[in-house]
C-alpha cells in the first residue's frame, strides 16, 4: 500500500492533476505568454479551492517561456512582518530581478529601498483609492520618500528590461500567492503598492485574491462609508482579467477514482457515483475539504476493519464514507442520529423522514436542533433542501436491497459504523445525568411500543408520522411519543388523526387520541363531529386545537396490541359515521 494520508501540498504538474482542469490551465498559459503587457490576472476562489495548485501548474508549464517570480504573502506575514510586508514584497521582487553586474539601476533600487524602509509606514500605507501616483500623497517634508518611490518605479522598469535581456525572455510573470489569507486591510495595502508597479511594460502579475477580500479590506481601511461600488471600482482598476476557479467543472469522479486506487480499495462506476453524490450534497467540491474527508476515511477504515468486521466489506466502506460526510458537514444531524442509535430509537422510518423536507420542516423542534433556523427564527430553505438531499443519498447507501423499508439488518450495519465513528467527531457526547436514567428507560419503552403499533397500522389505517420530543418543555415530557396521519373529511375538512402515549413511571401508560385542525377549519369540524364523535363514555376535551380523548391504564405487556386495536376501532368509527370515506 502507498503512503497514507493526503497533505495540503499543492499540485505542481499537469500529470498530477486529478480534477481534469488541463483545458483551463492551457488556456491561461497561452494567454499569459502572448497577451499585451502590462497585464494583471486574478485567480479567484474560496480557501482550499485549488488556487495555489493552479498557479503552480501554470508556472511549471510556462517556466521555459518567461522569467517567473513567486511571492508567498502568507509565509511573510507569519513572521511578524505584517507592518513591513509591502517593503518586504518589493525587496524580494527586486532581489529576484537583479542583474549579475552591479549597475546604476541596482544602486538606485538599493538606495530607494533603504529610504522606504525608514519611512514605510507613511510611504506605503497612505495611497488613496483614486489610483493617483504615490508622489501625490506626500507633503514637502516627505519629499525624499516621494522621490525614492518615483525612482524605485523607474528603476524597477529598467531592472525588468535588464533581466529580460539577460535571460532572453520577453516577459516577467510575477505570481503573488495567498493574498486572501492576509488581513483584508493588509491585502488591500499590498495591492495598492502593486498598483504602482502593475503598469510596467513586459510584466504580467498573477494574483491569488478574492473579490470579497478586497471589498472587505477597502471597508476596513477606509471605513464603512466606502460602498461596494467603490470596492469594485478599486478591484477593476487593478485587475484586467478576473478568473474564477472552475470548481463546478472539476472532474470529481476522476479525483475519487484516484483517491480510492491510492488506498488500494475496490473501485467501480457505482461506488464512484455514490461517493460523488454524497460529496456533492455535503462538503462540496473544495479540494482541501475533500482531502480532509479522505484522510478521515483512511483512518476510520483502518479502525472499522476490526471494529465492524460483521459488515460486508464494500458496504462497510460505503457506510463509513457516508457517515464521515455527514459528520464533517451536518454535525448536529450526525449527533442526533448517533444519539438515536444509542437510545435504540433509530428506525428506517425516522431515517427516511430526515430526507423529506416537509417532515423536517414541520417536526416540532427539529429544525432548531439541526441548526436550520436563522437569526430571524425562519428556516433556511436552501440548507434544509441540501441536508435532505444528502439524507436521500445517505439512506440509499444504507438501503442495500432498495426496498425503502430499511430492515433490522441494514440498520444494525449502520449502527456498527456509528459506534466507532465518533472518534473523529468534533461534537461532544451528551452527558446524561443519573436523574434522567428512569426518563430515558420510559422513553425507550414508549418508543418501542409506538414503533410496533405504527407497523401494525400501516396496512389498515395508513402510514403515520412518528414524533418524539428532542427535549422536554412545559407539559411535554421526554418520554412522550405520538403518531399522526392527515385525513380529509367527507365534507372536505382537513384534519389530523393523532394518538400519543405518555407516562409518569415505568408502570404507567396513558393513551390520548386527538383530532386536530387549523383554526380556520375548527368550527366546521365541531359542526361535523359534534360533542362526542366516538360516542365514548368519557366525553372528549374540546379546545382551540380540536378534540382529545384520554384512555388510562394500558398494561405494558400487551400495550402494542391494545393500542393497535383501539386506533383501528377509532378509524372504523370515523368511517361508519360517515366522517371519512
Image: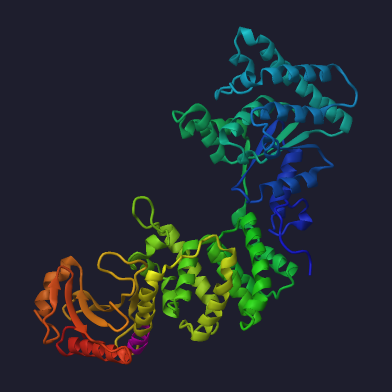
Task: Check the image and report above or below for 124 versus 264.
Answer: above
The residue at 76%/23% (across/down) is 156
Residue 304, image x and y in percent?
Answer: 64, 75
Q: Name the colour scheme.
A: rainbow
Relative placement, left or right, of 41 versus 578 is right
Q: Which residues are magenta?
A: 451-457
Quadrant showing the N terminus: bottom right
Task: Check the image and report above or below for 510 versus 80.
Answer: below
Residue 243, image x and y in percent?
Answer: 63, 44
| The one of 23 and 166 positioned closer to us in this rendering | 166
Tell me, yes or no, if residue 199 can be seen here. no
Task: Check the image and report above or below for 111 versus 471.
Answer: above
Quadrant showing the C terminus: bottom left
Q: Residue furthest top?
A: 140
Instruction: State whether the magenta stretch is mostly helix, strand or loop.
Output: helix
Residue 289, image x and y in percent?
Answer: 61, 57
The residue at 63%/51% (across/down) is 48
Tell me, yes or no, if residue 509 can be seen here. yes
Residue 266, image x and y in percent?
Answer: 70, 76
The residue at 84%/16% (across/down) is 104
Relative placement, left or right, of 578 versus 266 is left
| The one of 436 and 242 positioned closer to us in this rendering | 436
The answer to which quarter of the image holds residue 568 is bottom left
Amino acid at each position: 500500500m502507498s503512503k497514507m494520508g493526503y497533505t495540503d501540498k499543492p499540485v505542481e504538474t499537469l500529470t498530477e492533476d486529478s480534477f481534469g482542469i488541463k483545458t483551463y490551465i492551457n488556456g491561461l498559459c497561452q494567454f499569459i505568454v502572448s497577451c499585451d503587457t502590462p497585464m494583471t490576472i486574478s485567480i479567484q476562489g474560496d480557501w482550499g479551492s485549488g488556487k495555489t495548485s493552479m498557479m503552480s501548474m501554470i508556472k511549471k508549464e510556462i517556466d521555459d517561456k518567461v522569467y517567473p517570480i513567486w511571492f508567498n504573502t502568507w509565509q511573510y506575514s507569519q513572521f511578524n512582518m505584517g507592518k513591513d510586508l509591502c517593503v518586504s514584497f518589493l525587496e524580494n521582487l527586486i532581489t529576484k530581478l537583479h542583474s549579475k553586474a552591479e549597475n546604476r539601476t541596482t544602486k538606485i533600487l538599493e538606495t530607494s529601498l533603504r529610504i522606504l524602509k525608514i519611512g514605510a509606514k507613511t510611504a506605503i500605507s497612505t495611497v488613496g483609492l483614486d489610483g493617483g501616483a504615490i508622489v501625490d500623497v506626500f507633503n514637502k517634508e516627505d519629499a525624499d520618500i516621494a522621490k525614492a518611490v518615483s525612482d524605485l518605479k523607474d528603476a524597477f522598469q529598467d531592472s525588468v528590461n535588464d533581466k529580460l535581456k539577460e535571460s532572453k525572455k520577453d516577459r516577467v510573470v510575477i505570481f503573488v500567492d495567498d493574498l486572501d489569507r492576509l488581513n483584508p486591510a493588509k491585502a488591500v495595502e499590498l495591492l495598492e503598492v502593486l498598483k504602482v508597479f502593475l503598469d510596467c511594460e513586459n510584466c504580467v502579475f498573477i494574483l491569488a485574491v478574492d473579490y470579497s477580500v478586497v471589498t472587505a479590506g477597502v471597508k476596513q481601511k477606509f471605513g464603512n462609508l466606502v460602498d461596494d461600488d467603490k470596492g469594485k471600482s478599486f478591484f477593476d482598476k487593478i485587475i484586467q482579467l478576473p478568473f474564477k476557479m472552475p470548481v463546478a467543472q472539476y472532474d470529481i469522479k476522476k479525483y475519487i477514482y484516484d483517491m480510492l486506487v491510492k488506498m488500494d480499495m475496490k473501485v467501480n462506476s457505482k461506488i464512484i457515483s455514490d461517493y460523488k453524490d454524497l460529496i456533492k450534497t455535503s462538503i462540496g467540491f473544495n479540494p482541501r475539504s475533500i482531502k480532509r474527508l479522505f484522510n478521515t476515511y483512511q483512518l476510520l477504515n483502518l479502525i472499522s476493519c476490526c471494529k465492524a468486521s460483521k459488515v460486508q466489506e464494500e458496504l462497510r466502506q460505503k457506510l463509513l464514507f457516508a457517515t464521515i460526510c455527514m459528520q464533517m458537514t451536518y454535525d448536529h444531524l450526525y449527533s442526533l442520529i448517533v444519539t438515536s442509535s444509542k437510545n435504540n430509537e433509530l428506525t428506517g422510518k425516522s431515517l427516511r423522514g430526515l430526507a423529506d423536507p416537509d417532515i423536517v420542516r414541520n417536526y416540532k423542534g427539529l429544525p432548531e436542533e439541526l441548526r436550520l433556523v436563522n437569526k430571524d427564527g425562519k428556516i433556511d430553505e436552501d440548507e434544509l433542501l441540501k441536508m435532505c438531499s444528502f439524507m436521500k443519498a445517505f439512506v440509499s447507501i444504507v438501503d442495500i436491497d432498495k426496498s425503502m423499508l430499511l430492515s433490522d439488518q441494514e440498520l444494525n450495519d449502520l449502527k456498527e459504523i456509528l459506534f466507532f465513528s465518533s472518534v473523529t467527531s468534533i461534537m461532544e457526547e451528551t452527558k446524561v445525568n443519573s436523574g434522567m436514567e428512569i426518563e430515558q428507560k420510559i422513553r425507550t419503552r414508549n418508543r418501542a411500543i409506538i414503533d410496533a403499533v405504527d407497523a401494525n397500522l400501516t396496512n389498515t389505517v395508513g402510514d403515520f408520522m412518528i414524533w418524539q420530543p428532542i427535549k422536554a418543555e412545559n407539559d411535554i415530557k421526554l418520554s412522550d411519543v405520538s403518531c399522526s396521519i392527515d385525513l380529509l373529511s367527507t365534507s372536505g375538512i382537513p384534519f389530523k388523526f393523532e394518538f400519543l402515549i405518555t407516562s409518569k413511571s415505568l408502570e404507567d401508560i396513558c393513551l390520548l387520541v386527538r383530532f386536530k385542525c387549523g383554526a380556520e377549519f375548527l368550527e366546521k369540524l365541531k359542526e361535523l363531529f359534534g360533542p362526542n364523535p366516538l360516542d365514548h363514555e368519557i366525553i372528549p376535551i374540546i379546545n382551540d386545537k380540536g378534540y382529545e380523548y384520554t384512555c388510562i391504564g394500558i398494561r405494558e405487556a400487551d400495550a402494542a396490541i391494545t393500542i393497535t386495536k383501539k386506533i383501528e376501532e377509532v378509524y372504523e368509527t370515523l368511517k361508519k359515521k360517515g366522517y371519512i370515506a
